[in-house]
Amino acid sequence: FFLSFQRIPSHYLSSNKHDNKFIMTRISPSSVLSLLFLAPFSFTHLIQRTHSFSPHSSSPLTIPSHALFHPIQSSTRRVILSPTLGKATCHPRLPLRRRFQFVASMAMRANGSNQEEKIPGRGKGKAEKIKIAVIGGGAAGLASARACLRANQLLSQSSKLQNNDDERDDDENDMLEVTIFESRRSFGGIWRYDDASDEGKRMKTKDRPMYRNLRTNLPKELMAFREFPWILDDNDFGDVVNKGGDTGSGHKSPPPPPSYVTHRQVADYLDKYAKHFGIEKYVRFGCRVTQLTVLTEDENKKVEEMTTAVDEKKEGSNHGEMQSTPSFYSCWPSISLEWTTVTYEHVNGNDPTPRMQTHRETFHHALICNGHYSLPSFPPIPGLRNFSGRILHAIEYDDPLDFKGQTVVCIGARASGADIAKEIGGVAAEVFLSDSGCERWEEFGTKGENVVKRVPRTSWIDDEGGVHFSSSASSGEDDDGSTQKKQEWVVKNVDTLIFCSGYDYDFPFINKMSNLELSFPSGERRVQPLYEQLWHAQYPSVSFIGLPHSVVPFPLFELQANAVVSQLLLQSSSLSSSSLTEKETEGLIESQVVPLPSLQERMEKARLDATSGGPESPGRVQDTHFLGSHQWDYCLKMAKIGGVYDESMENYIATNKALYDRSGKERKQILPGKKDKYRETRFQRDDKNQTYRIIYSEMEEEKSTVS
């Protein structure tokens, strides 16, 4: 292996097996051909450390083996080392012909040649576009697009440094060509609230889980994307209760910004995020993806031939034998997408007539970001047909006034169930929050003070419509030490059942015609085969952003998307390091992009994950993608796979954990139906110390008053 610099001799790296380092020594240009006959050895680590040296120094430069592929700082010229040609990384295991091509390329650079490289399938001096489809324009889709644009910025910076080129057309030369397919006319996903009270919408079934009074149950300091802090405008403060302090002069100090924000503020934050990073122009609105197909080997060859022919025609280049070099298309299979658009035509002055059109395009990679809050899950309840009242799912809930004076049962007591029960409790006659983790009938406060009662799981419905709740067969011991027996309670004259029972994963564009083995049965909440809950284990050119649940979503999306893009660039052999910025690489020591393992290893890991029942013991199939307190290890793993792991990232994730634990602890102290005082807490991050500062806490003030 060797490095070369303009106007100085080439350099040769020889291996020292005793200290596992590579020593750089000066040799004559004629000796460079010895590179072609080095003993086979491979480099599995990508460097994240900057080294400085003078090419005129007589002493050799020692570079650790893990630091092989990092930008090297020369006293004569800054060089970004990218030992690649075409689509294959140049190392001694390459065929002899490929080594000659690499040597010839580097020799031209060392001799100061201005001739541009002709890379197969790329055109004269230009990188072939890697086309990426992002399905879904919600938070996960925006984070995925941003990861692609961030990688393009890195490549642009590297190109300027290598070519001394300060002018660049971003759209023309961007290596990653990203397209976001959004079925609606605006992005934001589930955070884009549709007011069901608007004219013409009242009779339409609500198909998003957002409801009018929703506030997040995670603080914004925790929810925000890492590179885009959440700053609220002054006019945002009116949506929530704010607390101001006395300055001592009789005037109230400005209220601290709320930490728990409304869905409108989240949607506004996503709008600002997209605008700040210029993501809007990559979104195709009104495009509903209907079919995803993995191309066969023959179809991939046709795509490759067509692309090469187009590039040759555009540039008038003749690549000769180099055209036979395996390209990106033969590494991971390409993806064909079909989608529909609807246009409206006016015929003879009549009302506009909708006209549906179908489109098809091929991409190198598809990031599936369609979320998992669109297909309601209804657990089977014996006798449900006996219930004559209203049955709905939490996705349809919007206004608590719809349940005024009613007796309501909320089936499911996690985040949405608890919040909806509390809201309805302000106007309903009685609300029963059915919790599978509860073993007894629980009432809070005096009669009439709190209409929300917590009861065990809903077990069955009798012939008269009575709703029965049952404890488990073995529910521990009473206070006196006697064994509790299975108990059952019944509530009659229930007006409404609200299923707060979660959602199933749904990918309506993946089917038997997709050439993609993917299983996601209704009721299981399990998608397989997946490697690290992210890549399709067999075809990594298909990835799924945001499948894990019980997590902090936005930061997770960010890390997953970066990992996908980094692996895509690594696989394309167009870049030897990850999509890191200079700031992120500064001070790194052992961090590196961790390549995906072999197909066999990925499939075995996917099989084990799919049968594990999740990280908790004993597990169950519905918790396959549950993370909860295990999400921090997962985030660290994503950071390492994406090559962005360093001390600042570790501090960031540790601070997220501290905020998550504190928020969860306060939330659990709130009894069903009681005021959500935890949502009045204001936080401030302190990443350097892996902690936070509480600016204001109503719960802490109450404790102080009591004490």
Image: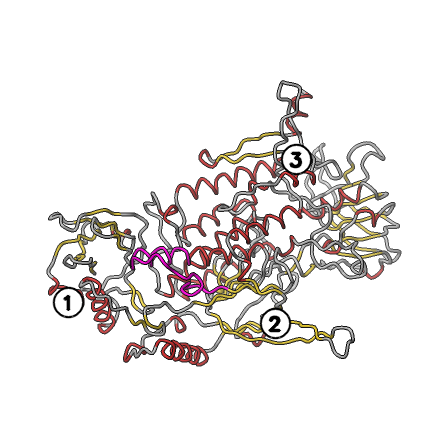
Q: Quadrant of the C terminus?
A: top right
In the rendered image, residue 192, in percent from the top left (x then y), is placed at: 66, 54
Give the residue at mark 3: 678
Q: Which mark is residue 33?
A: 1
Q: Which mark is residue 532?
A: none
Give the residue at mark 2: 290
Q: Is residue 601 depicted above or below 250 in this figure?
A: below
Q: Is residue 118 depicted above or below 156 in this figure?
A: below
Residues shaded magenta: 152-178
Q: Is residue 538 visible?
A: no
In the rendered image, residue 440, in percent from the top left (x then y), is placed at: 75, 41
Residue positioned 13% across, 48% down in the render: 57
Circle 2 SS class: strand
Query: How many other residues sit within 10 Å of disc 1, few (<14), some (14-19) or many (≥20)?
Result: few
Q: Nearer the viewer, residue 363 or 538?
A: 363
Q: Quadrant of the N terminus?
A: bottom left
Q: How many marks?
A: 3
Q: Quadrant of residue 110?
A: bottom left
Q: Earlier in the sequence, mark 2 or mark 3?
A: 2
Circle 3 SS class: helix
Mark 3 to mark 1 CA distance (whole Å): 69 Å
Q: Nearer the viewer, residue 670 or 685?
A: 685
Please give left or right for residue 246 compared with residue 606 in the image: right
In the rendered image, residue 15, in percent from the top left (x then y), is placed at: 18, 56
Q: Earlier in the sequence, mark 3 or mark 1?
A: 1
Three-letter residue code for mark 3: Tyr
Three-letter residue code for mark 2: Thr
